Amino acid sequence: MKIVIGLAAFLVLAVAGTAFAYPAAAAVACPYCYGFTGLGNGIYVEKTMSAREREQAQAVVAAARERVADFYGALDGRPRILICKSEDCYQPIGGGSRGQAILDWALFLSPRGTSDVIAAHELSHIELHSRLGLVKTWNRAIPQWFDEGLAADISADPRYLRQAGNGDRCLIEPGGDMPTTRSAWVETARTQELYARAACRVDRWIAAHDGPAAVARLAQNVSAGESFEAAAQ
């Protein structure tokens, strides 16, 4: 009996510790515990949202999914999508960002990020990670600059690229080396310049490799064990 009680106490402490140390992961596991309500189709919104706000949130997700699906041809990723109405909701799980993707499991949108551009950016991360697989994503088999540049490209974010159909889309030349790890990217990407550089390099790579299908091939080859450098040739 004591062993059972001890095990139960350990599990309670483990869950509580996870929720304290990794609130984003805890929110993915139990959205309802963090003040979200489900709308179906993988979408969860802060429960204080009005009916109109919930419709708007669903429309944003639908537009983002369509944009990413148009690029890839189909969606492989099936993340949970958690959308906050208030900063009090978002701060514990996403900090100061507009949106955030966790591997291929989930994405969060802040009140400042509930737009089809930001949602498509985060969904682009999810889709690439889904095609790479958990191990390759965790090990950063594809450098962070490519992941971020691709997200900026697919989302057609006007801060980083000109709209398609006007020749070269770059707002700034890509320049030299860019961060390959997430931690280095976060430390460096404090202005729009780095995102614009990465977006330019990726957009030109896509154009030189016969379009969006090249990204799907690259992800497939890296997932199968090829290096990024070899797959990107």
Image (tube, rainbow, N blue to C red):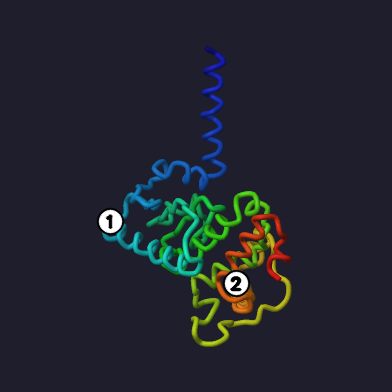
As drawn, is 56 to the left or to the right of 131? left
> Residue at the location (67% across, 56% down)?
140
* Residue 22 position within the rendered picture, expressed as x and y whole percent measured from the top left: 55, 44
Q: Position of residue 142 (x, y in %)?
A: 66, 61
At label 2, the amino acid type is Tyr
Q: What residue is rendered at 27% in x and 60% in y?
A: 52
Q: Farthest residue toward the bottom? A: 167
Q: Which mark is residue 50?
A: 1
Amino acid at pointer 1: Ser
Instruction: Name the mark on residue 198.
Output: none
In the rendered structure, which disc, 2 or 1, sits on the residue that comes first in sequence? 1
Report if residue 6 is visible in the image: yes
Q: Position of residue 214 (x, y in %)?
A: 60, 70
Badge 1 density bin: few <14, some 14–19, many ≥20, Cα 10 Å: few
| Residue holding disc 2 | 195
Q: Give the position of the C terminus as an image quadrant.
A: bottom right
- Counting the numbered discs, the total is 2
Task: Tell me which residue sits at (31%, 55%) in the image.
Answer: 49
Which residue sits furthest left? 51
Question: Where residue 180 sits: x, y (%)?
Answer: 69, 63
